[in-house]
C-alpha cells in the first residue's frame, strides 16, 4: 500500500491549527494507520494509532480521523515544540509502509 | 522500563555486509505479543521499514529489500540483528530498531545509528 502525504510542507504560526493528510492507494485494513512525529536527531514518536487513538502521554491537541483510504492528523493550537516532520504508516498488511512525510514549519 | 539500543560498525565498504544488533533491556524479547523491527532513514529522506522478527523466529521482510536482508533473534542474549548484503551508497542511512506489539504501530524506538557506506 502506497501512502501519499500532503502537503509536503505546512507553514503556520504558533496557535494555529495544522491539518495533515495521508491518502492510501487502497483501503487500510481495520483502519490500522498510525501517525509519528520526528524531530531532528531524535527517533520518531508514536502519536496516533488505529487512525484515531492517541498513544500514551500524547496531548489532546493531537487528533486523528479518517477511514478506508483517507486519513487526517489535526494539531490544534500549535505549540513551539510541535514544529517537526510527521509521518503516517499503515500496518494493515504484513508489508508495512510509511508516507513520505509532512514538514510543519514556523511561518 | 523497556529500552532499545542499536550497535554495530558505523562505516561499511561497498559490496560488503552491513551488520547491526539491537539490545533489548528492561524486559524480555520473548514476550509473546512483541515483534521487533528494523527501520531506516537515508539522510534527508523518509522512513523505510526493512524487516520484522518475532521471538519464535517468524520473519517478515520488505519486498524491495528481501533479497539482501536477513533479520534474526537471539533470545539468550535478548537481542535481534540485521544483515544487509552487497551494500551500496544507497544503503547509507540512520538505522532504527523498534518494537511493535501484535505487529501494530511502532511504540518504542531505539535512538538510531548512522551507517555510512563508503570506501
Image: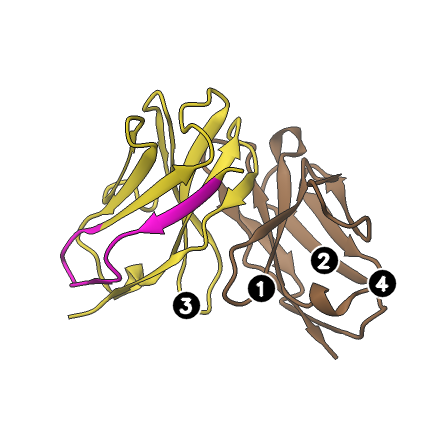
Chain colours: A brown, B yellow
Distance, label 2 to label 1, CA atoms, is 17 Å
Q: Are the residues flagged by discs 2 and 4 from a single subunit?
A: yes
Q: Are the residues flagged by discs 2 and 1 from a single subunit?
A: yes
Crowding near the residue tagged with mark 1, few <14, some 14–19, many ≥20 C-alpha atoms within 10 Å:
some
Distance, label 3 to label 2, CA atoms, is 23 Å
Q: Secondary structure at mark 3?
A: loop
Q: Which residue is mark 2?
A: A20
A52 lies left or right of B81: right
Q: Are the residues flagged by discs 3 and 1 from a single subunit?
A: no
Q: Residue B56's image quarter?
A: top left
Of discs 2 and 1, which sits in the foreground? 1
Distance, label 3 to label 1, CA atoms, is 13 Å
Q: Which residue is mark 4?
A: A77
Q: Residue A15's image quarter?
A: bottom right
Q: Secondary structure at mark 1?
A: loop
Mark 2 or mark 1: whose residue is earlier in sequence: 2
Q: Which residue is mark 3?
A: B43
Distance, label 4 to label 3, CA atoms, is 30 Å
Q: Do the CB atoms of the residues marked 4 and 3 lie less than 8 Å apart?
A: no
Q: Do the CB atoms of the residues marked 2 and 4 lie less than 8 Å apart?
A: no
Which residue occupies 50% across, 37% down? B2
Which residue occupies 71% across, 45% down? A57
Amino acid at each position: 500500500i502506497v501512502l501519499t502525504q500532503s502537503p509536503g510542507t505546512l507553514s503556520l504560526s504558533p496557535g494555529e491549527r495544522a491539518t495533515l493528510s495521508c491518502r492510501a492507494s487502497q483501503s487500510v485494513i481495520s483502519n490500522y494507520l498510525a501517525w509519528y512525529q520526528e524531530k531532528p536527531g531524535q527517533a520518531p514518536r508514536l502519536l496516533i494509532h488505529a487512525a484515531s487513538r492517541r498513544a500514551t502521554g500524547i496531548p489532546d491537541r493531537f487528533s486523528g480521523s479518517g477511514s478506508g483510504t483517507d486519513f487526517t492528523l489535526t494539531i490544534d493550537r500549535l505549540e513551539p515544540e510541535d514544529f517537526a516532520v510527521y509521518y503516517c504508516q499503515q500496518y494493515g498488511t504484513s508489508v508495512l509502509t510509511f508516507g513520505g512525510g509532512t514538514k510543519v514549519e514556523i511561518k | 522500563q523497556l529500552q532499545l539500543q542499536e550497535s554495530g560498525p558505523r562505516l561499511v565498504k561497498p559490496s560488503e555486509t552491513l551488520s547491526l544488533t539491537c539490545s533489548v533491556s528492561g524486559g524480555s524479547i520473548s514476550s509473546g505479543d512483541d515483534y521487533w523491527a528494523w527501520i531506516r532513514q537515508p539522510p534527508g529522506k523518509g522512513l523505510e521499514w526493512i524487516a520484522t522478527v518475532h521471538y519464535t523466529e517468524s520473519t517478515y521482510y520488505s519486498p524491495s529489500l528481501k533479497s539482501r536482508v536477513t533479520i534474526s533473534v537471539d533470545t539468550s542474549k535478548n537481542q535481534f540483528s540485521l544483515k544487509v548484503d552487497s551494500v551500496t551508497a544507497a544503503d547509507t542511512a540512520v538505522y532504527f530498531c523498534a518494537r511493535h506489539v501484535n505487529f501494530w504501530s511502532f511504540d518504542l524506538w531505539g535512538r538510531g545509528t548512522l551507517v555510512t557506506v563508503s570506501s
